[in-house]
């Protein structure tokens, strides 16, 4: 899942991975963080062609560090054993291949008097590794550290923040009467990609704004559904509700996607309500199936 959080998190505390029984071991701790990748904005009805790059694996620097600090001590077979054990123990896919990149081109079409703003984050998984060997110059019970490094892996998980303002002072349009009535942001977790989208609770459900679409989800059991938004509520999203870059980043296939939606609470704020720009509901509202 691609749940966004702004701080670096410890995913797995320090643990031991035997490579050669009683002779070679690796101590490992795993952290994750979301790194800023790209920011785009287009304004005032001026269509702009944008390019988005998706890059996953190890950078040339990280690959050289892995080879010089870890593989030099463990050997090729030792690295293979380390990856296999990591995947089996932690339940994650370890991608230590050299980076592979894929480019996507799309058109940003802002309102005549407003703007579109897009921010992309990528999940980076850091493996803090230290290699220890026993024997050689030291007594039997002594483990000697032979090398260590922090290896950052660019994963295939992304978060997108997409906002569309219907009026911007910089466009020099006549002032418009707008409303800013969103309650904050929800995390729409679609698996490999997460959207942090403005939301507002209504008398019979929730409105979620994704780019130019405002999607209305009626709640069959209102209070239970609102309560479930704290921990995660499953909702179905149609393909034509989502921006093309979201489809690309998440490798989404099909016409309907199940997402886990939860209220996003930024740890830097005392309230769940986030400051919003003036966001005006699109007249092309979409109505979803009841939740």
Image (cartoon, rainbow, N blue to C red):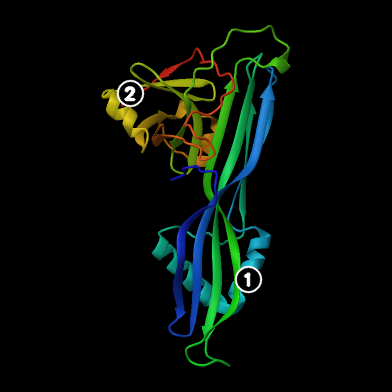
Residue 61 vs residue 251, the one in the foreground? 61
Q: Is residue 254 visible?
A: yes
Taking the spot 62% from the left edge, 77% from the top edge, the residue there is 72
Seen in the image, is 202 located left or right of residue 168?
left
Residue annotated with mark 2: 289
Q: Residue furthest front?
A: 270
Image coordinates for residue 287, horizontal then vertical, percent:
39, 19
Q: Residues within 10 Å of mark 2 (few under 14, many from 20)?
A: few
On the question of residue 53 being in view, the answer is no
Quadrant where the N terminus sits is top left
Is residue 180 left or right of 173 when viewed as pictured?
left
Residue 277: percent from the left, percent from the top? 59, 22
Task: Give the percent coordinates (x, y) of residue 70.
Answer: 59, 73
Kind of element beneath mark 1: helix
Residue depicted at 41% across the width and 31% down the height: 255
Pointer 1: what residue?
A: 67
Q: Residue at x 51, y 43 (%)?
A: 5
Observer-nearest of 267 and 188:
267
């Amino acid at each position: 899942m691609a749940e966004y959080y702004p701080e670096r998190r410890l995913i797995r505390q320090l643990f031991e991975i035997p490579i050669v029984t009683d002779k070679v071991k690796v101590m490992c701790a795993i952290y994750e963080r979301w790194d800023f990748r790209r920011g785009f904005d287009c304004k005032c009805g001026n269509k702009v062609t944008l390019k988005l790059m998706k890059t996953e694996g190890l950078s040339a620097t990280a690959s050289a560090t892995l080879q010089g600090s870890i593989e030099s001590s463990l050997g090729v077979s030792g690295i293979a054993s380390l990856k296999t054990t990591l995947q089996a123990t932690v339940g994650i896919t370890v991608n230590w291949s050299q980076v592979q990149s894929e480019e996507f081109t799309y058109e940003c079409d802002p309102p005549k008097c407003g703007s579109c703003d897009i921010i992309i984050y990528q999940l980076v998984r850091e493996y803090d590794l230290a290699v220890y060997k026993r024997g050689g110059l030291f007594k039997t019970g002594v483990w000697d550290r032979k090398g260590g490094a922090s290896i950052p892996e660019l994963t295939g998980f992304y978060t997108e923040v997409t906002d569309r303002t219907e009026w911007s002072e910089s466009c020099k349009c006549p002032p418009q009467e707008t409303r800013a009535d969103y309650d904050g942001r929800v995390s729409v977790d679609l698996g490999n990609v997460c959207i942090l989208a403005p939301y507002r609770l209504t008398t019979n459900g929730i409105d979620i704004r994704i780019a130019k679409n405002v999607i209305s989800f009626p709640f069959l059991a209102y209070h239970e559904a609102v309560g479930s938004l704290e921990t995660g509520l499953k909702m179905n999203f149609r393909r034509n509700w989502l921006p093309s870059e979201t489809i690309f980043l998440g490798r989404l296939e099909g016409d309907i996607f199940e997402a886990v939606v939860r209220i996003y609470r930024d740890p830097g704020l005392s309230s769940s309500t986030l400051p919003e720009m003036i966001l005006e509901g699109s007249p092309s509202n979409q109505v979803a199936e009841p939740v």
